[in-house]
Amino acid sequence: MKIAILGAMPEEIDPFIVEIPTQIDYYAGNKFYKAEFAGHELFIAYSKIGKVNAAITATLLIEKFKVEALLFTGVAGALKDNFKIGELLYATKLAQHDLDISAFGHPVGYVPGNEIFVNTSKKLNKIAVKTAKDLGLTLKSGVIASGDQFICDDDKKAWIAKTFGADAVEMEGASVAQVCSAFKVPFFIMRAISDVAGHKAEIDYDEFMENSAKTSADFVLKMIEKI
Ligand code: SAH
């Protein structure tokens, strides 16, 4: 099967490049690593940060490289107290917290023609749960809200958690979800917590991002063996 591995930043996909010998292909300002792993053809890339960058790379992976499933791996800020730094969660559904035409009476996150939430693949989520069980790892699940902002503010954090019932916040997942859903490609969004998205979250982020990025990538690597 052709499987895409997508991250936003080099640190999020580096563990794959280290573990697997790859070939490189450049296209549209993106670097795509190709590899054979566990009987699959992998297409590995980082998009650069933010929803637009992530949407471009996800679209290329699907349209140019014809991937049949997409696994996102990376880090996120926790919005609820039960998610601690270093913990893993996969998204059950995702929304864009900065998409706002509420001036016209619509709910935040909604634009005509789309739903507020995009659901992830139940089949891939099940494989993740089984992988965690077999490895004896704790894997949580939750709602992820994405937007083009690094959230490091207690009021904003509380607003996103309440408005979307969200457990974690990041800057790419919901756009990847929208692209995959439009192309009917099953997708999975894995995140390890790097910070708790409140005041001065950037300090925790700088300290824990690399470790959390590796935790997430290592998990996805194991998960591929079960696909
Ligand atoms: N390290 C970068 C900036 C990181 S932006 C630099 O200095 O260039 C944060 C990245 O981690 C995004 O890709 C986002 O998806 C994720 N992320 C982690 N914690 C986040 C938070 N609190 N709010 C939003 N995104 C967060």
Image (cartoon, helix red, strand yellow):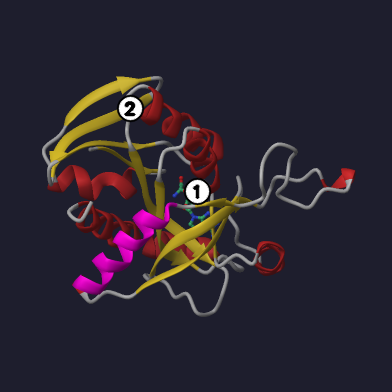
User: Can you identify the residue that label 1 sits on?
Assistant: 173
- Taking 74 as reference, is 3 left or right? left
- Residue shown at 46% from the left, 37% from the top: 184
Magenta span covers which residues?
Answer: 121-134
Q: In this view, does 38 lie above or below 82?
A: above
Amino acid type for the residue under numbered disc 1:
Gly
Q: Is residue 15 left or right of residue 145?
A: left
Any mark on residue 32, and which?
none
| Vertical order, 156 against 38 (above or below) | below
Query: What residue is disc 2 on?
Result: 66
Q: Does the residue labelled 1 lie within 8 Å of ligand 1?
A: yes
Given residues 88 and 208, the one toward you in this image is 88
User: In the structure shown, which secondary structural element does the residue marked by tag 2 occupy?
Assistant: loop
Marks 1, 2: nearer the viewer: 2
Relative to 9, 163 lies left or right: right
Q: Residue at 55% of width from left, 47% of height from top?
A: 174
Disc 2 crowd, CA 10 A, few/some/many (<14, 14-19, 20+): some
**Type of secondary structure dominating the magenta stretch:** helix
Expressed as whole percent of the image width and height from the top left, the position of residue 140 reads 41, 71
10 Å neighbourhood of mark 1: few (<14), some, or many (≥20)?
many
